[in-house]
């Protein structure tokens, strides 16, 4: 095969729009090559303008944002935090940082996100001393995740959270630009989490943000993220702080990326439609490969297009067969997240499961979904699939 045909097709690679260089050049010209600076302020303003409400603190990662959110809620050793099980470990790791116990909640089948009914059952069990035997505990937070850009059932989750007075930390790391009942993801909980890692829909190379309608939450986050330095002419610290603020140069990249965000969302959704058309044709030949549907009033940014392949309905072909066929052609594909309740590091953690996330992990695959995919790359992808599903 020609070498050019073997160039790697990435799952979701960074996609620059052109304006990033101008913002970065300005940072260099003004010598703002340091943490914080005018581009950090500008990036936060850009985010708030896009989201349509609230305040934002630009941080070094989405993980840092979750960590600070838990600190602000007063999470301490011995506390319980309810967390979606089907997610990346960064959603759960900060719970352990603080010595608290994660309680993993399985997914519902419609959006693949946190199951509200299981969440409510876990809260009741915690309050009645059935999670920590003989010790009734009020959970300190609920962390739902909008997987692959698909909004979770936030109405039901927020209703339960309000009923039991448990704050919601909305992990929208994969869902910038997604909407739920006309509202932007990241603005649907007490606090929202965004990520700008290199594979996200826009990137700052590495970075994240904490979002909240409460200005005091954001003020506290900025204070803690800047080593918690007190207002004094000398370096004085009364609280434990962290080096979590975004740099001015990375924020400059983010400002350039914000100018193309609507186009990036549009392209990701176009990618999903191309896959949907392809699999509709393939399923017409007797297969049954399924994409994650978009429920009413849910508008996904389609960060990644995902499929599930039940081998019993597809001639014995598994998602691993598909992944390996892609790998042989230098095309990156990835299984769906391995549920946190199956991870060795979280062995023994309380969990509420129905088997939904385990089935999704067994049968699910993320397909190349970058906004910079070319026509020739799509032809390679579809060629592999046509060859496998003859």
Image: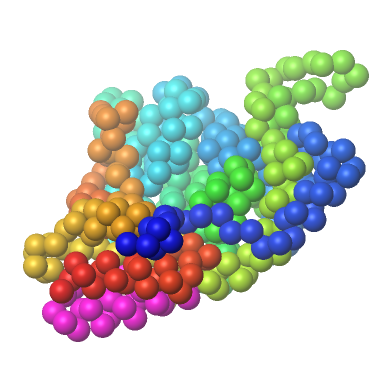
Q: Is residue 277 magenta?
A: yes
**Left or right side of 128 for 236:** right
Percent coordinates x, y for residue 295 in the rendering: 38, 73
Residue 19 shows in the view: yes
| Front-lying residue, 30 or 189 | 30
Viewer-nearest residue: 96 or 306: 306
130 to the left or right of 250:
left
Residue at horizontal 44 percent and vertical 51 percent from the top? 145
Locate the C terminus by quadrant.
Answer: bottom left
Q: Could you say where residue 230 lies in the image, as x and y percent from the top left?
A: 80, 22
Up-down: is 296 above or below 37? below
Q: Quadrant of residue 350?
A: top left
Asked where in the image residue 244 lies, by quadrant, the reply is: top right
- Residue 131 occupies quadrant: top left
Any part of residue 159 in sight: no
Dominant secondary structure of the residues highlighted in magenta in the image: helix
User: Residue at point 87% right, 38% down?
Assistant: 31
| Residue at 13 percent of width and 79 percent of height | 286
Against 151, residue 90 (above or below) is: above
Q: Residue pushed farthest front?
A: 2
Number of numbered discs on residues = 0
Left of 91 or right of it: where is 234? right
Percent coordinates x, y for residue 156 in the rendering: 41, 60
Q: Height in image: 159 above or below 250? A: below
Which region of the structure is painted magenta? 269-292
Tell me residue 140's x, y (percent): 47, 36
Q: Who's the residue at 80% across and 36% down the image?
A: 33
């Amino acid at each position: 095969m020609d070498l050019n045909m073997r160039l790697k097709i990435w799952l979701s690679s960074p996609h620059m729009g052109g304006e990033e260089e101008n913002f970065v050049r300005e940072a260099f010209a003004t010598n703002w090559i340091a943490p914080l600076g005018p581009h950090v302020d500008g990036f936060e303003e850009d985010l708030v303008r896009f989201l349509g409400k609230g305040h934002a603190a630009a941080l070094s990662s989405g993980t840092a944002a979750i960590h600070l959110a838990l600190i602000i809620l007063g999470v301490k050793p011995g506390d319980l935090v309810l967390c979606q099980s089907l997610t990346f470990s960064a959603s759960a790791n900060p719970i352990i940082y603080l010595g608290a116990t994660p309680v993993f909640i399985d997914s519902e089948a419609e959006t693949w996100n946190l199951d509200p009914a299981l969440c409510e059952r876990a809260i009741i069990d915690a309050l009645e001393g059935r999670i920590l035997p003989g010790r009734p505990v009020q959970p300190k937070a609920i962390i739902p995740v909008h997987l692959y850009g698909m909004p979770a059932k936030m109405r039901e989750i927020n209703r339960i959270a309000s009923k039991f007075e448990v704050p919601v930390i909305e992990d929208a790391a994969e869902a910038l630009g997604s909407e739920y009942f006309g509202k932007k993801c990241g603005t649907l909980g007490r606090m929202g989490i965004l990520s700008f890692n290199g594979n996200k829909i826009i990137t700052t190379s590495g970075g994240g943000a904490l979002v909240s309608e409460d200005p005091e939450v954001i003020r506290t986050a900025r204070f803690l993220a800047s080593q918690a330095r007190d207002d004094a002419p000398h370096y004085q610290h009364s609280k434990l702080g962290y080096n979590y603020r975004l740099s001015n140069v990375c924020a400059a990249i983010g400002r350039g990326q914000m100018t193309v965000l609507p186009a990036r969302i549009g392209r990701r959704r176009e990618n999903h439609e191309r896959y949907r058309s392809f699999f509709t044709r393939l399923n017409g030949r007797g297969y049954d490969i399924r994409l994650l549907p978009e429920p009413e009033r849910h508008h996904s940014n389609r960060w990644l297009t995902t499929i599930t392949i039940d081998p019993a309905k597809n001639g014995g072909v598994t998602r691993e067969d598909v992944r390996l066929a892609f790998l042989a052609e230098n095309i990156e594909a990835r299984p769906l997240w391995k549920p946190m309740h199956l991870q060795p590091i979280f062995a023994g953690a309380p969990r509420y499961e129905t088997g939904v996330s385990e089935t999704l992990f067994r049968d699910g695959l993320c397909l190349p979904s970058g906004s910079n995919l070319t026509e020739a790359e799509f032809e390679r992808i579809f060629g592999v699939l046509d060859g496998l599903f003859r």
